[in-house]
Amino acid sequence: MRHKGYRGIVVVLTFVTFLAGYGLLFFTGVTNIRHLLDNALSAYLLAWALYGMFGQVSLPEAGTRFLLTTGSLLFCWVLAEGAVLIDLVDYRALFGSYESGTALSVAGRRFDKELLWRHDPHYQYETPYQGNIGAALCIPPDPARTVAVQYDRNGFRNARDLESAEIVVIGDSYMEGYFTRDDNLITTRLSELRGKSVANLGHAGYGPQQELTVLRRFGLPLAPKTVIWAFFEGNDFSDAEKYDERVLRSGSGWWQDFWFRSLSRNVSALLFRSDRQCTPDDSLKELRADFHDTTHRATTVFFASAEVERISDQTLRKAVVPLIEAAKLCRERNIRFLVAFVPEKFRVYHDLDNVSLTTDAIRQWRVSDLPNQMQRLLAELDPGIEYVDLTPALKTASRTGIPTYLPDDTHWTDEGNRVAAEAIHHALQRSERPGLPPNT
């Protein structure tokens, strides 16, 4: 009897120690999803080991139960994950994305060794509008303003698959325009103004190196007469700096696609979802202004925190290397090449009479001479590159009370897309007819 009592105490203490250790591990030591899965597997195996040691069955019986249970679980897991391998299911679409800054955690994207990720062929979605700054300020999505987006066979924002295009537009989210309807996109507007077919090869999150790859793989095969490269000052520099590191960390293609679509990863990701209420980024509340439209109605607009960061000469030169290579590729094929400088919202709004900078923090901001600096560098490296700074056109429209940027986001409004398209159209006209005055 004494032996049985002692054994019971050992069993209880062992289980308590086990549970306490793993509780401590899960609550303080899990740093990412793979770590969580490792811990869960270890906990499962150790639990069976404890069962075999202290259970009221023989070791052979415990082993048989372990094999049957584990085999059944593995069979179900293989079935669930096998559907991912043959592309029948994407668990990201079922469970949603609970991570920020992880591109492949979002449904409808696939791994690409050079591009790092791209949209699935013919993928489409509809979601309530929520600006990127608005999300950081905890402004809830607006279900009255849904955003519907669809992609072509190559994962770009074109209403149909294209075999050819007279004009190809390269760029990032400003060109993709995921807050803009198809008929208001800059590329749609440009097609109407030019009377020519325009391929939209803009992709959110891409930097110069990726955009050069887009030109090679998808743009040049369309045999265009003109290529327009939209360079956004907001993140194209940082994207250029980080690209090599991201490629080194990207791993293999099939594993990336399987891992991010898998049941294991997406179920585990649910555990990392915070149940806490959204906490606004208070620093952004100080980066605001009042924009007065054509009816003199004031709207509060917010700016991104990094809008006036200074760009070093080294960073600038690294970012324009892909543009120089793109110009060379186009010249070899007798294709016109135009670089369009896309400015940040503050560069356009900061000195307008109908914009009131309402906080001390935003009044201290100063804009750089980056558009002219970039134009001079491009002219130095390749005098044949055509260049247009979209800032003056956007300022002119905004000064009249036309909001060209979304108030709670860093991207253009529908009117901003229109104004930018007209500015590019006029730049192409001026080069075709050199006698035209600058603002024609």
Image: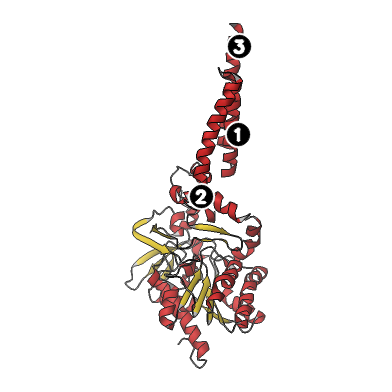
Check disc 3 and report its element: helix, strand or loop. Answer: helix
* In this rendering, the label closer to the viewer, 1 or 2: 2
Sequence order check, earlier mark of 1 and 3: 3
Check disc 1 and report its element: helix, strand or loop. Answer: helix
Q: Residue furthest top?
A: 1
Above or below, 267 against 318 in this view is above
Q: Are marks 1 and 3 in contact (CB under 8 Å)?
A: no
Residue 138, percent from left and from top: 43, 52
- Where residue 116 sits, quadrant-wise, is bottom right
Q: Is residue 14 visible?
A: no
Above or below, 386 against 172 in this view is below
Residue 156, percent from left and from top: 48, 67
Please state which amino acid type lies under the numbered disc 1.
Ser
Q: In whole angstroms, how far apart are the C-alphas of marks 1 and 2?
A: 25 Å
Sequence order check, earlier mark of 2 and 3: 3
- Give the residue at mark 2: 84
Please state which amino acid type lies under the numbered disc 2.
Val
- Give the residue at mark 1: 42
Q: Residue furthest bottom?
A: 435
Q: What numbered label is drawn on residue 6?
A: 3
